[in-house]
Amino acid sequence: KIGRREMPYVDNLGVKIHYHVEGDGPPLVMQHGLTNSLQTWYAYGFVEELQKDYRLILVDARGHGRSDKPHDPKDYDLKLRVSDILAVMDDLGVDKAHYMGYSMGGRIGFGLVMHALDRFHSLVLGGMGADTANTDTPPQDRIDLLRQGMAAYVANAEANEGPMEAGRKERLLENDPEALIAATLAPRGTDGVGELLPGLDLPCLLYCGDADGFFPGSKASAQAIPGAVFVSLPGLNHGEASRAGELVVPHVSEFLKGAAMKVGAGR
């Protein structure tokens, strides 16, 4: 079994992608949001609970964590980000998996719908709609902040949200601002995915804080997918919902048990 201390990597077209594996059971790929890393799943209780029933495949997205951090926006094309997920699965010999992504990880999930749907049993997409612009932090505002460096980025976040816990601050400060700028400048790449949603034939769970700018798009996407489950997190904004493991995990666990039954029934 690959333990997290071995820090495995896979080379995808010259970009090293770092991942962890935790737990045993059906494989569940987990992809974090922009400015985060796979450590975020540990920090907020997701790994502790979900590893009891699933083989968690936690991926550091390109530009984040211990993965390579290219500075060219073209290196953050959505198809490349999707191929990073598939490269990790191939490295582990995993043909099909469940998928969970939040924010940027949710957008990558919609990319899977477009480019790799046959590799997944179910999708859990948090804090994201099918082809929704970021209405909380306009891209140019994020870029202007990142150009001042990560310390300024963190100071701005604390000015807006109040002091953050030490671990979260440390994880943010470890980011490469030039890589995050490149990732922000890359096109969304999800044009046309909305047209595919009514034809989706796999279990989907979407969740979003109702104080998140992405909420309307997330809810509309859930309504467009036949049989999709939508979970609203009252009073939470985009960042708060990403850290609300104690609220999110019970919904995810219940959903995945139902999805696994459909897989077992040969759906």
Image (tube, helix red, strand yellow):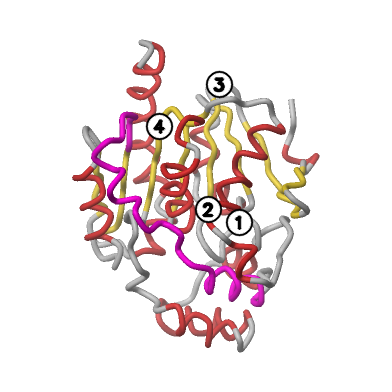
Q: Which residue is mark 3?
A: 25
Q: Which residue is mark 1?
A: 37
Q: Which residue is mark 4?
A: 122
Please state which amino acid type lies under the numbered disc 2.
His
In the visual, does 208 lie left or right of 52?
left
Q: Which residue is mark 2?
A: 32
The image quadrant of residue 8 is top right
Disc 3 to disc 2, C-alpha distance: 21 Å
Q: Earlier in the sequence, mark 2 or mark 1?
A: 2
Q: Earlier in the sequence, mark 1 or mark 4?
A: 1
Please state which amino acid type lies under the numbered disc 4.
Ser
Residues at circles 1 and 3 in contact by the CB criterion of under 8 Å: no
Residues at circles 2 and 1 in contact by the CB criterion of under 8 Å: yes
Q: Kindly state the secondary structure of the residue where label 2 is placed.
A: loop
Q: Earlier in the sequence, mark 3 or mark 4?
A: 3
Find the magenta span and give its range. Answer: 177-204
